[in-house]
Image (cartoon, rainbow, N blue to C red):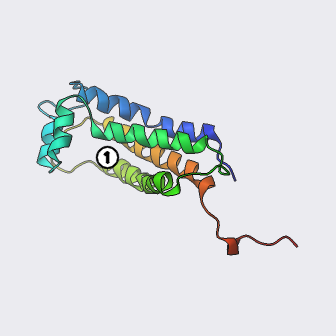
Amino acid sequence: MTTHPRAVALAAGLALPYIALKSYWAAGGRAGMADGFDMADEFRHNGAPTALIWLERHGIDFTAVLAVTGVALALFLAHRPPARPLPRRLLLTPARAGILLIPYGLLTALFGALGSGSDPAPLTGWVAPAGAAAFVGIGSALALAAWPHRRVPVSAVSAEP
């Protein structure tokens, strides 16, 4: 089975609004944020490494970089025929790990819909769906793109009658 590159591109395209929004925020934009909310301060509060806080303060959001990397990996795998040699561990391990973004995106959507309880939300209502769509889109794109590259055990291949 081969993956249709358009299906991968469509799934990966769900990440574009997220990438644009996070890049906009890293560049100093405020749309979608509550008054007084600062993403770098939030990173610090949550225990992020100093390097990630520094990147955010200097206009580079690491989650946007990771999203672009996931999209690029999915598109690369989708356009590479399964018969061609592939550095399996280098490419398929992160692709398979990225598939975990699907349940993460679904949980993000669920918690976004349920709200955060009594605390005022630091982000406006349209931000959670953009993030959820990105996570599900990148995870789905990686799943679709990695599937044809899997190894099928010899015992699973049936002999022709």
**Viewer-closest of 37 and 121:** 37
Q: Which residue is mark 1?
A: 112
Q: Is residue 78 left or right of residue 112?
A: right
How many residues crowd around disc 1 within 10 Å: few (fewer than 14), some, or many (20 or more)? some
- Which residue sits at x=24%, y=30%? 26
SS class of the residue under badge 1?
A: helix
Residue 151 in the image, given as x and y percentages of width and height: 61, 63
Report the residue that reaches farthest toward the right: 161
Q: Does residue 51 appear anywhere in the picture?
A: yes
- Which residue sits at x=46%, y=57%? 93
Q: Does residue 120 appear anywhere in the picture?
A: no
- Where on the picture, by quarter, is residue 152? bottom right
Q: Is residue 125 above or below residue 45?
A: above
Query: Could you tell me how many numbered marks the image carries?
Result: 1
Q: Is residue 161 above or below residue 3?
A: below
Residue 116 in the image, given as x and y percentages of width and height: 22, 49
- Which residue sits at x=64%, y=47%? 3
Kind of residue sitting beneath label 1:
Gly
Q: Is residue 144 left or right of residue 72?
A: right
Residue 61 in the image, given as x and y percentages of width and height: 27, 35
